[in-house]
Amino acid sequence: MTAGTSPLDPPPPDPSSLVRLTGITKTFPGVIACRDVDLDVRRGEIHALLGENGAGKSTLMNILTGIYQPDAGDIWVDGRRRHFAAPVDAMGAGIGMVHQHFKLVQSFTVAENIHLGWERTPGRIRARDLAARTLELAHTVGLAVRPDARIDELSTGEQQRVEILRVLARRARVLILDEPTAVLSPLEAEELFKTLKRFVAQGNAVILISHKLGEVLGSADRITVLRGGLKISTTRAADSTAKALARLMVGHDIVRNALRVRGPSAARVASTPVLELRDVAVCDATGRPRLDRISVKLHGGEILGVAGVTGNGQKELSQALTGMLPVSAGNILLGGVDFTHRNAREFADFGVGHIPEDRLHSGLAPALSIIDNAALREYARAPLSRRGWYRPAQARALAESIAAAAEVRIADFDMPAANLSGGNQQRLVARREMRIATRVLIAAYPSRGLDVGAIDTTMRCLAQLRDAGVGVLLISEDLEELLTTCDRIAVMCRGALMGVADPESASIEEIGLLMAGQHATTTALPDLRG
Amino acid sequence: MTYRFQRSATPPGSRVIAARGIAVVLALLTAGAVLRLTGAAPVALAREVITDTFGSSFALQDLALLVSPLILTGLSVSVALRVGAWNIGAEGQFNAGAVAATGVGLYVPGPPLVVLGLMLVAGIGGGILWVAGPALARAYAGVSELISTLLLNFVAGLLVYWLATGPWLEPSGRAIGTTARIVPEIPALWDEVHWGLAAAVIIAVSVSMLLTFTRWGYEIRLCGSNLQAAHYAGMPVRRHLITVMLLSGAIAGTAGMFEVAGTVHHLQGGISNNFGYLGIMVAVLARRSMLGVLAGALFMAVLLNSGIILSTRGVDVSTVLAVTGLVLLYTAIGDEIAHYRFVRAPEPAAARINEMSST
C-alpha cells in the first residue's frame, strides 16, 4: 500500500453519504460475526441489508447503534468519525433503530412510551401535556397514533408505528428497521413503506434489514448483501433481480426440492384423519378469542401447511394441538378418540411430537445440561427409566444419538443447552421431537434460525415422516417453503381459518389475500372438513 | 496488542473454587485491617480463633453441633430453590418443628424411644404445616412465597416465646423463659454430638440421589429450571411445586426437632438461633448442589463459631456480623468474577492489512 492512503485515514468526503461504516470487524467467542464490512448509506435512500440468519446483519446494526463496540473499523457520520459507547450516543448522532421485538412498555400509554427515557421530556409530566406533545409529534412526522391508548390494546402494526415515532421524535436521520414486515399484514406493510418513502424524501435515510427478496426489490434504492459476516455486494435495486440476489445471499443457486413428490415406497394418505379439530375455540385470560371455531382434519401421510402472519393464532393452535393449552369450546380427536381434555403428556404418549415456536422458552430448559434436555420426551420411558429410577448414563446415550442424527457436534454434553447456538438448539429439538412423532408432528417454524442447508435437511425429514405415514402440520411464515412442501395449505387470520389452498393451483397472491383477512371469493376452495 | 475480558456462561468448577478461596482470604485480610483499626490485634485473635475452633475435641464438638442444623436448613432452602421457590421461611418451619416436637416430648407419655419417634413425626408435621399455607397460596393464587414464608417466621418466633414463657413454662418456677427438660433425647454419636448430625448428612445425600437418579427428581429439576418446558412435556407442575415446598418445610421442621431433642433439651425463646436465615446463605454458597450444602454448612458453622469466640474476646457483636457479611460479599463477587477470562483481543483488520502490505 502506498504511503498516505492508510485505511485509517478518513474516507474522501462524499456529500451524499450520511453514514459510513469502514472495515467493521466483530467477533464473539468462537464466531466471527462481521469481517471487514464496509457500508455506505446516502441521504434520501432506503438501503436494504439482505442476508440469511447469521449473515451478520443484526451485529452490524447493533454496532451502528452503539449496542456493541466493533473490534476494528470505524463509523463515520456526516464525514466525521464517531465512537458510540452506548445506544444513547448513536441516538444523539441521529441514528435510531426499531427492533424486531418491540421495546415498548405494554402497560403504558402511547404518549408515555414516546416520552420514556427522553431528555426532552418535561420534568413535571401530566397525562394531558404528554398526549398533546405526542399528537404534535405524530402530526409533524405524519404518523397516526392514539396518544392515550395503552400499548397492549394496539395491533402489532400500530405498535410498530409507536416505535417508529419514538425513534423519529428523537430527531433520527437514519432509521434502522429490523424485519419490519414480519409482523405486518400486506396492507400494513404497504402503509409502512409509504411512511418510509416520505421520511427519506426529506434527506434522511432508512436501513432496512430483511430476507424477503420481493419486498426489498420493491422498496429499496440500493441493496447490500451480507453472507457469513462478509459484505458480498452493494447494487442498485433497479439493476437486480430476485434470482441474482438469492444467489448472492446463499452463495449458490437455490434448488427447491419438490418435496411434494413422493417415492414409490411412501405411505399413502390415510383415509381416516389421525387428528381432527371440531369447532375448536380458545380464549385468552381477558376473554378475547385467540382461536375462532377452527375445524380441520389432518391425515396420516400428508403435510398440512398453516400460513399466516405471525401472531394470528398459530401459537395457540400448536399449543392446543399438543395438549398445552386448554380449549374453551370444541373437540380435538386423535385417532378418533376424544383428547380435548387430556394433558401434554398424553398427547406425547399417543405419538404427537411438537417443535415449538419458542424453543428456548418452552422446548428447552436452557440452564440444564444438553443431556437433561435430550431426555425431556423420553425420561419416563425405557431405557431411560426403570421402575421410577432415572438413568443418567442412558440419557447420555440418547443425547449422543440425537446429536449424531441432527449432525450437531457437541464437545461437552454436560454443558447447559444455553451454550448452544440457536440453530443447533433448533436442530436438537427437531430431532428429539421426530423421535416421538409416530403419529403426528406439529412443527411450528422449524426452519427459523437455520441456514439454507439445514432447512433443506429439516424439510426432508418432514417428508420422510410423511412417507412413513405420520401426519405433519407445518406452521410457517415462508410461503415458498409451504408451497414446495405441503399437500394442502390452511391460511389463518385473527385466530380463524380463512380457507385451505391447494399448492398445485394457488398463487402466492391468493394466499396473501387470505392472510390479510379477506375471505376466499367465488373460486371455491377445497372443503376444510374433507 | 489489546487485551479484554470475556464472559463465559458457565465457569469451570476449579475456577469457582479458586475464586472463592481468594475471596475468603481477602475478606479475612479486610476484616483484620478493620479489627486493627479498632485497636485489636488481628493476628493474635486469628490464632486464638483457630485453636479454639479446631484445637480441642470440645471445640470440634461445638462446631459439629452447629453444623447439623445448618445442613438441614440449608438443604431446606436449596431443595425449594430446585423447584424454583424461595423458601425464606426455614426459620419459621424450624421453630414450628421445635414446638410440635416439644409438645409431644413434654406431654405424651410412653417409652422414651417411642416418644422420640413421635417427636420426629411431630417435628416434620410442624414444618409441613408451617409451609403448607405459603405453598398452596403460591401454587393456586400465585402469591409470592418469598413474602409469605418470611412473614410466618415472625409468627413462629413469637409462638416459641409465648409457649416458653407462658403455657409451657417450667412448672417449678426455677427457670425463666424455658420449658421443663424434655426427657426423650437423641442418642449420642460422640459425647455431646448426637445422631442428628449423621441423620442430616444421610438426608442430604438421599435428597441429592433422589434429584439425580429418579424420574421424580428429573421432573423437579426441569420444573425449577423452566416451568414452560415442564408444561410442554406434560409434567404436573403445580403438584411438584407443592410437594417440594412441603418437603422443604419437613426438612426444616426436622432440624427444629433435632435441636430440642438432641442439643438444647428445652424449648426456649430464640432456639432457632437464626439457623433458618443462615440456611439461605448456605444454600446460596452451595450453588444449587445438595452435596455443596454439606460444605456450605461447615463453612457457615466455622464462621458462626469464630464469631462466638471473637465476642468472648471482647470483639463487638456488630464487628463479628460485619466479618461474616464481608466473607459472603467477597464470595459473591468472586463467583461473578469467575465468569470472566482475560483474553487477547483480535487485532484490528486495518492494522493487519498494514502489516501485510508493509512486508
Image (cartoon, coloured by chain):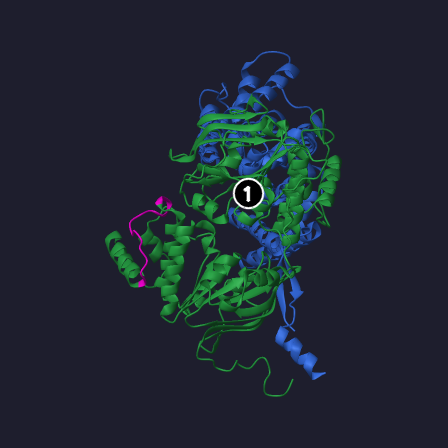
Residues in magenta, as a range: A141-153
The quarter of the picture where residue B339 lies is bottom right
Specify the quadrant that holds the N terminus of chain B.
bottom right
Q: Crowding at label 1, few (<14), some or many (≥20) Cα neighbours within 10 Å? A: many
Q: Residue at x 62, y 27 (%)?
A: A350
Q: Vertically, is A71 above or below A395?
A: below
The kind of secondary structure element at disc 1 is loop
Query: What amino acid does circle 1 point to?
Result: Pro
The x and y percentages for residue A501 are 51, 40
| Residue nearest the viewer, comparing B241 with B68 | B241
Task: Please check the rendered image and state whether residue A149 is part of the magenta-colored stretch, yes or no.
Answer: yes
A382 lies left or right of A303: right
Q: Residue furthest top?
A: B110
Give the chain letter for blue.
B
The dominant secondary structure in magenta is loop
Q: Vertically, is A361 above or below A387?
A: below
| Residue nearest the viewer, comparing B20 with A3 | A3
Give the chain letter for green.
A
Task: Please check the rendered image and state whether residue B255 is part of the magenta-colored stretch, yes or no.
Answer: no
Q: Residue at x 64, y 16 (%)?
A: B112
Chain at tag 1 = A
Q: Residue at x 38, y 33 (%)?
A: A287
The quarter of the picture where residue B33 lies is bottom right
Can residue B44 be seen in the rendering of this structure?
no
Q: Vertically, is B204 above or below A185?
A: above
The x and y percentages for residue A419 are 64, 50
B153 lies left or right of B225: left
Can residue B344 be seen in the rendering of this structure?
yes
Specify the quadrant that holds the C terminus of chain B.
bottom right
The residue that mark 1 highlights is A503
The quarter of the picture where residue A248 lies is bottom right
Q: Residue at x 48, y 56 (%)?
A: A179
